[in-house]
Image: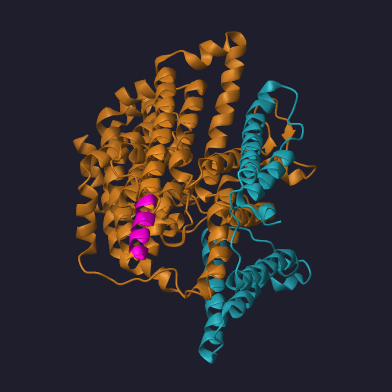
Amino acid sequence: MRRLLDRDLLTALVLFGVGAVFWVDPGADVKDWIFPRLATYLVLGIAVALTARVVFAAIMKRLPDVIPVNVDDRIAFVDVLVFLVIVLAYMLVMYGIGFWLSSLLMLSLTSIYLTKERTRRNIILAVVVPLLTCIAAYFIFLHVFYVPFPKATWWPGLS
Amino acid sequence: MIEGLMLALTPSYLFWLTVGVMIGMVVGTLPGLTATMGTALIVPFTFALPTGAGIAMLGGLYVCAMFSDAIPAVLVNTPGTPGAMATAFDGHPMTLQGRGHEAIVAACFSSAFGTIFGATFYLLLAWPMMAIALKFGPPEFFWLGIFALTIIGSLAGDSILKGLAGGAIGLLISSVGISHGNELSRFTFGIPEFRGGVSLVAGLIGVFAVPQVLSMIASLRKKEYIAEYKPQRGQTLKTISKVLAHPVHCIRSALIGTFIGILPGAGSPIAALVSYSEAVRWSKDKSQYGKGDLRGVTASEIANNAAAPAAMIPLVTLGIPGSSPAAVIAGALMLRGLNPGPELFQSDGTLVYTFGWSLFLAGIVTFILGSLFAPFLVRIILIPLRLLAPLIMLLAVIGAYAIRNNIFDVYIMLGIGVFVFLVRRLGFHAGPIGLGLILGPIIEPSLVQALYISDATSIGNVFFTGTVNIILITVTVLSIFFVALSRRKDRAQARASDSLKSRAAAVAGSD
């Protein structure tokens, strides 16, 4: 069972997946398909080589190269997951409440979540730094570099 | 030429040049804002200035953006522009070792060195260099791209197979969108937004910045800051002497940057990557590359900055811009009724030389400002990770969005970022994936154009004849051979050191 978690085997599976995604028809003319098809062959070739290496290691009864996962890694994984969920939510609500308000919310929420020592000073910092950053970014990107960010559609007055 | 120098040295020209340099500092530092965008944005302001001063300001911005893109690359492993990708390979490990200040000063000095070198070529050798550059057609560009791919040998880490696979994944991502052959929609999976392809800047932010942010969060409970930083007196002079301790390396990097800069379409990223690859190949001690070797930073920065003035050579000699910012500068000249090219040399030679001298002086101004600000810039790493990680994420989102004002680019950036973060656990490195992303848009169009040419003759004639092709094929083969040889040597050394350690342990056990 542990052998199924072997690093090379997992890599091969990922590469087979990538190869499958890019295997779809890239066109009939050689000029359309030659470049992506060659890269796909390379990816699939490496996947086959890695699978063969895993099989050979199993036959030779060598220990599998399993990715170590300890308690710290699990906690770190939860932190990353929560962060990603907040970022995804930010991207979803961006069109609803506008870029700057959603950015402020994302920055504050993630900063507060990532502040593990929740002292009064740290919490204030986790709110003030995002606020100042958003104000600075707003002026630089909107008024100096003229980047048209998404505006609020749920409450147009917000942006 | 002397008249051009005198004009470039007038206080008003120097003032506007410095303003351009300062804007370039901001543009390069912020991921997503490129030198092209910066120059395009300030073109309208330059109309209020004399032509020479306006062009000097644009040149100053371009040159400084090529330095300041190294700052986020060094401090937070996020290249400010694609040209600084190779700088991150050694620059960020230096920051992790508490040598962030040294890395920034080295990048700054190297950028100034590269700029001055490239500008000297512009002033003295524009025409002979152009004659060589004109020998580059699609097959030559194809082989140049393939040659640049051999750098995977130095970026792959422990597994060359995973490095190759990473490079191929980068190439595949770059091929999403409209094909170069018959303009067919490719790998779009029915999603119309994919037709625009993956933006290079968004892709690179995804490859470098997002995994970095996620790694910061994953390590948040173990460390509070990216790295320690203790200010040291005399760091600037010490670093300069360290950089100058390798004169051959510096001149080689500058020559590579200048030559690749002249080739229209190749640009700073390729110059930096090829220079880095050559630095590794020619180095006697390769063991520290990728782990914080100062020469890695200088190779990349000298070349990408030498490429900036060099990209102006085809503009002033033939009227062909060598890079995107050069195209914007060409546009600015045309809007003033001046036609870049041989005509301009004859009709307004002073302007051509004033511009060359302004680029030369921009290198010096960049160095002065960069080394003054370096001690303050490096303090970014003293921001606690809990605050820094979300801030970088916001900049990544803005950067990916701002390049095409398209929210879909942000989704792509995040998707690529999460993918790279996960596959890093499997032993992949971000470098080869980024390399594939950068080289794909150069290799594929060149390959397709060369195939079109071969319709009229034969593939063998197009790809395997001609001096430049044969030279590039030879150095590519030699490069692969040297990579294989050096990896074999490394493995043998590792085995020897392992057996030595186990013997020592056995002796200690028996005692």
Q: So how many labels did they put on this image?
A: 0
Report the magenta stretch's main SS. Answer: helix
Chain corresponding to cyan in the figure: A
In the picture, measured across the screen, residue B86 lies left or right of residue A151, that is left
In the picture, measured across the screen, residue B195 lies left or right of residue B3, that is right
Q: Position of residue B60 (x, y in %)?
A: 35, 49
In the picture, measured across the screen, residue A104 lies left or right of residue B345, that is right
Query: Is B485 above or below relative to B422?
Result: above
State the residue in front, B306 or B156. B156
- Residue B47 in sight here: no
State the residue in front, A74 or B121. A74
- The answer to which quarter of the image holds residue A97 is bottom right
Residue drawn at x 52%, y 85% is A122
State the residue in front, B180 or B238. B238
Colour in which the image shows chain B: orange
Residue drawn at x 37%, y 27% is B317
For the C terminus of chain A, the quadrant is bottom right
Residue drawn at x 45%, y 39% is B153
Q: Position of residue B432 (x, y in %)?
A: 52, 44
Which residue extends farthest top?
Answer: B457
Residue drawn at x 30%, y 43% is B114
> What range is drawn magenta here?
B499-510
- The answer to which quarter of the image holds residue B480 is top left
- Residue A28 in sight here: yes
Q: How is the image coloured?
A: by chain
For the N terminus of chain A, the quadrant is bottom right
- Residue B509 falls within the magenta-colored stretch: yes
Q: Position of residue A49 (x, y in %)?
A: 62, 37
